[in-house]
């Protein structure tokens, strides 16, 4: 996905179209094509990647939050539609994970503000393998009774005031 951090009044039509295509339309179209094939095989699992900004919000995140929150609705509806075919559809909402996008964002804040963001994580900033481990669980046989859910994985970031 991509993130465009701008005030609502600064968002252009091009910004809106681009982030909608990448963050919401692409997962929708991929699911639309692949889930029927999973159903033909008698089972399948889908994990959509939402964001912590679909659960909580922050200034200048209206566009990003819109697309990632849309994924939560898509996850629930798709899970209902395909449950009878043994297709499990869930989403995860990661917080700050050491990725190129997070590093770029933290670097733009300055040293003190960046450290403040890091300090808001009781368990520290996540690693890509933390997210991968949750995805692995959701696609494993251990998750056979979980569908239509969005799981937050953020090191405790969202539980603080």
Image: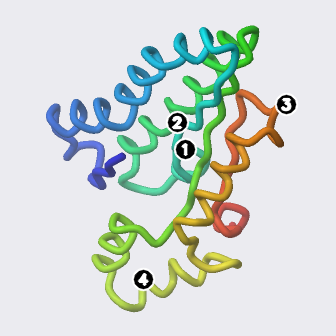
Q: Residues within 10 Å of mark 1 (few under 14, many from 20)?
A: many
Which residue occupies the foreground of this view, 91 or 67?
91
Q: How crowded is mark 2: few (under 14 residues within 10 Å), some or many (20 or more)?
A: many
Are circles 3 and 4 on residues that touch, CB within 8 Å? Answer: no
- Judging by the rendered image, the residue that carries numbered circle 2 is 69
| Secondary structure beneath label 1 | helix
Q: Distance between the residues labelled 1 and 3?
A: 24 Å
Question: In the image, 59: left or right of 161?
Answer: left
Are circles 2 and 1 on residues that touch, CB within 8 Å? Answer: yes
Q: Which mark is residue 114?
A: 4
Q: Which of disc 3 and disc 2 is earlier in sequence? A: 2
Q: Which of disc 1 and disc 4 is earlier in sequence? A: 1
Q: How crowded is mark 3: few (under 14 residues within 10 Å), some or many (20 or more)?
A: few
Camera-near label (2 vs 3) is 3
Quarter of image, res 120: bottom right
Q: Which of disc 2 and disc 4 is earlier in sequence? A: 2
Question: In the image, 100: left or right of 154?
Answer: left
Name the residue located 75 percent from the left edge and 9 percent from the top edge.
84
Q: Which of disc 1 and disc 2 is earlier in sequence? A: 1
Name the residue located 60 percent from the left edge and 9 percent from the top edge.
40
Q: Residues within 10 Å of mark 4 (few under 14, many from 20)?
A: some
- Judging by the rendered image, the residue that carries numbered circle 3 is 145
Q: Distance between the residues labelled 3 and 4?
A: 39 Å
Question: In the image, 45: left or right of 7?
Answer: right
Q: How far apart are marks 2 and 3 (CA)?
A: 23 Å
- Judging by the rendered image, the residue that carries numbered circle 1 is 54
Quadrant (top left/top right/bottom left/bottom right) for the C terminus: bottom right
């Amino acid at each position: 996905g991509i993130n465009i951090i701008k005030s609502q009044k600064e968002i252009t039509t091009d910004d809106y179209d681009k982030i909608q295509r990448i963050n919401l339309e692409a997962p929708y179209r991929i699911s639309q094509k692949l889930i029927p094939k999973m159903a033909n095989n008698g089972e399948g699992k889908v994990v959509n990647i939402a964001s912590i900004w679909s659960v909580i919000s922050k200034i200048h995140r209206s566009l990003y939050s819109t697309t990632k929150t849309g994924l939560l609705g898509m996850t629930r509806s798709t899970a209902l539609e395909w449950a009878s075919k043994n297709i499990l559809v869930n989403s995860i909402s990661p917080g700050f994970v050491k990725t190129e996008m997070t590093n770029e964002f933290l670097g733009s804040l300055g040293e003190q503000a960046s450290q403040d963001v890091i300090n808001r994580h009781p368990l520290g900033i996540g690693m890509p393998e933390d997210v991968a481990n949750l995805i692995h669980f959701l696609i494993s046989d251990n998750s056979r009774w979980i569908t239509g859910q969005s799981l937050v994985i953020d090191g405790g970031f969202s539980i603080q005031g």
